[in-house]
Amino acid sequence: MVLDTGSQLSWIQCHKKIPKIPPPTTSFDPSLSSSFSVLPCSHPLCKPRIPDFTLPTSCDQNRLCHYSYFYADGTLAEGNLVREKITFSRSQSTPPLILGCATESDDAEGILGMNLGRFSFASQAKVQKFSYCVPIRQGNHTVKPTGTFYLGQNPNFRTFRYVNLLTFPQSQRMPNLDPLAYTVGMLGIKIGEKKLNISTRVFRPNAGGSGQTIVDSGTEYTFLVEEAYNKVREEIVRLVGRKMKRGYVYGEALDMCFDSVHSMEIGRLIGDMTLQFENGVEILINKERMLDEVESGIHCVGIGRSESLGIASNIIGNFHQQNLWVEFDLRNRRVGFGKGECSMQV
């Protein structure tokens, strides 16, 4: 499963037994579980306008609660809402949780939804603290290294530095705001030793909710609202603009791209990038992690415009969380960051 701090619904890939057709190795067979049950159409979650559960649901031909959801990157997840408990050991298991049982999906891995919504895995399982470490990717997107995930206390917690979560009461809900996301107070961006001239207001929600800064493990790259993105792009063009590929955009999102033969030089010329937060907390992105090999022979800076996703938020994606412990302390309403060697974790 993919751990996603930006979404609420957890879902698994389900399959039905079909003679002579082996099931996918990552799928779940509900018939083998004694604790599995499906949600009927009469369940309250299958009614529209649940305040903090905006998943589109409907009643299918079998009178079961059906959901269909497109993520920001266009990925589709579709299936039935079910109840199932998750067992970690003989002495540890969750109560029955509401999950998605996907029968149609563009991604066979499934999602572990960990945002602040009451139907996320974290909320339903009453998790007080969790953390993860994203391993270094090796350039081949077909190979997905496995990270490390802790439920509860992380043994490395003494090295973490914390920034408080920004909270938004119901009376302050705004149209462009995601109140269930992990929103932090970002203050600025440095490239090399240069602090970019970006107003701190673009990293905080305005009257309409635009501008919140979200820590999201489920989004691949980092996305910035227009004013912040333009300043970052302006500095990168100043440093390495002559080597930039003209007219090339990867995935309709990344437009600061280069021929891979120049990638080492480009990274050296750009230097490190630092994301600055409240309480003096910083995320240092080494120059070796500024560019990603998006396809054979092409590297791009892992930053795009938020509007390319159709959103008005700043998102710190998992590409810029590599080799970084990220802890979500839900009891104390804060997020912690600490250096890690994630590819070496066991």
Image (spheres, rainbow, N blue to C red):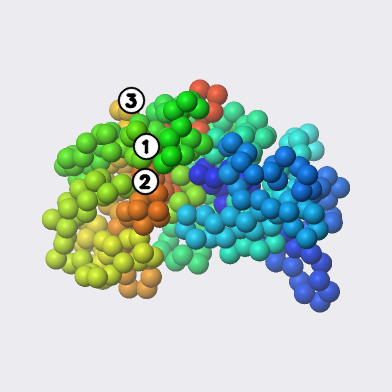
Left or right? Give the position of 73 relative to 65: left
Crowding near pointer 1: few (<14 within 10 Å), some, many (20+)?
A: few
Marks 1/2 in contact by CB < 8 Å: the verdict is: yes
Residue 100, image x, y percentages? 68, 51
Identify the residue at image location x=51%, y=64%.
143
Q: Which mark is residue 208?
A: 1
Q: Are marks 3 and 2 in contact (CB under 8 Å)?
A: no
Q: Crowdedness of circle 3 by 10 Å Cα count: few (<14), some, many (20+)?
A: few
Task: State the CA–CA distance, disc 1 to disc 3.
Answer: 26 Å
Label 3's element?
Answer: helix
Residue 338 picture quarter? top left
* Lateral position of residue 267 relative to residue 43, left or right: left
4 vs 92, nearest the viewer = 4
User: Which element type, helix, strand or loop, lies under badge 1?
Assistant: loop
- Residue ranking furthest to the bottom: 20
**Of marks 3 and 2, which one's residue comes earlier in the chain?**
3
The residue carrying mark 3 is 279
Instruction: Residue at 34%, 33% (x, y): give it.
Output: 207
The percent coordinates of residue 80 (x first, y second) are 72, 54
Q: Write down the residue under mark 2.
A: 312
